[in-house]
Image: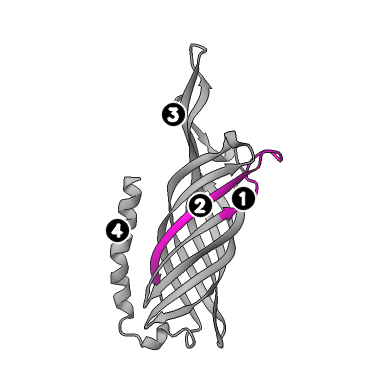
């Protein structure tokens, strides 16, 4: 967790340096009636958990890294509506406390279990841009995402062992994404939720779904 916060803090400190590249541009770059497209870089974190139809399979939240790039374009010159697609590395999963397991002496013990799921994630959202004041825009968005599992570990702390997370869940995930962004000149920040709709569990009766609150910062060019 400490390493994750340090990495995100370093990224936030670097963002103003990227923004200096845009200071020589015309202010019309940020007038969304004149701009047709943009691309951007993002760095942030997920507060992720797993939700199941079986309460015993629910996992509490854990923090994970997210970073990637986006490309957006205006759908019509007459309206400030934008379509944005991205490509992200995104860590999700969850954790559980006091999970029972059989110890070497045959007695039942309790252990902590952590699940890390690393995805290649493709979000696609529609944004509406509200002009608040000079160069400041509020951008609520709604859309969805698809994700393919790249790796991950299921760690059993009492048994001192780990296995691949994808021994227990499917690699494919997909769902809804909603949130809101704030753009000032080249600087951008957003917060939102990913609601997994795909059942990543191995049972049709006890479905497992990802849940994630995310915060990203970055720059738009």
Say which mark, if any, is on residue 10: 4
Going from N to C along the chain, the mark reached first, 2 or 1, is 1
Q: Residues within 10 Å of mark 2 (few under 14, many from 20)?
A: many
Going from N to C along the chain, the mark reached first, 4 or 2, is 4
Instruction: Specify start and end residues of the magenta stretch as a single range.
Output: 195-220
Determine if the magenta segment contains residue 193. no
Quarter of the image that includes the N terminus:
top left
Q: CA distance from mark 3 to mark 1?
A: 27 Å
- Using the rendered image of the protein, determine whether residue 116 is visible from the camera's viewpoint: no
Q: Residues within 10 Å of mark 3 (few under 14, many from 20)?
A: some
Instruction: State yes or no: discs 3 and 1 in contact (Cβ < 8 Å).
Output: no
Image position, residue 142 (x, y; %): 57, 66
Residue depicted at 46% across the width and 27% down the height: 111
| Residue on which disc 1 sits | 172
Please, what secondary structure does the residue beneath circle 4 have?
helix
Q: CA distance from mark 4 to mark 2?
A: 23 Å
**Figure quadrant of residue 131:** bottom left
Please, what secondary structure does the residue beneath circle 1 have?
strand
Instruction: State yes or no: discs 1 and 4 in contact (Cβ < 8 Å).
Output: no
Asked whether 59 or 124 is in front, the reply is 59
| Residue on which disc 3 sits | 157
Image position, residue 190 (x, y; %): 44, 65
| Residue on which disc 2 sits | 212
Going from N to C along the chain, the mark reached first, 3 or 1, is 3
Going from N to C along the chain, the mark reached first, 4 or 3, is 4
Determine if the magenta segment contains residue 198. yes
Please, what secondary structure does the residue beneath circle 2 have?
strand
């Amino acid at each position: 967790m400490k390493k994750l916060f340090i990495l995100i803090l370093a990224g936030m400190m670097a963002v103003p340096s990227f923004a200096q590249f845009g200071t020589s541009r015309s202010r019309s770059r940020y007038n969304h009636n004149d701009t047709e497209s943009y691309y951007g870089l993002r760095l942030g974190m997920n507060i992720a958990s797993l939700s199941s139809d079986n309460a015993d399979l629910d996992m509490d939240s854990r923090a994970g890294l997210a970073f990637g790039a986006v490309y957006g374009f205006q759908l019509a010159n007459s309206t400030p509506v934008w379509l944005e697609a991205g490509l992200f590395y995104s860590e999700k999963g969850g954790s559980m406390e006091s999970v029972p397991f059989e110890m070497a002496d045959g007695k039942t013990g309790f252990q902590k279990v952590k699940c890390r799921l690393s995805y290649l994630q493709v979000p696609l959202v529609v944004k509406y841009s509200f002009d608040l004041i000079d160069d400041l825009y509020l951008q609520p968005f709604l859309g969805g995402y698809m994700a393919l599992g790249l790796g991950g570990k299921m760690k059993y702390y009492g048994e001192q062992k780990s296995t691949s997370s994808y021994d227990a869940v499917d690699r494919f995930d997909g769902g809804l994404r909603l949130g809101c962004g704030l753009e000032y000149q080249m600087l951008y920040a957003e917060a939102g939720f990913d609601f997994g709709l795909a059942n990543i569990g191995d049972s049709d009766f006890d479905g497992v779904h990802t849940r994630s609150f995310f915060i990203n910062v970055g720059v738009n060019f």
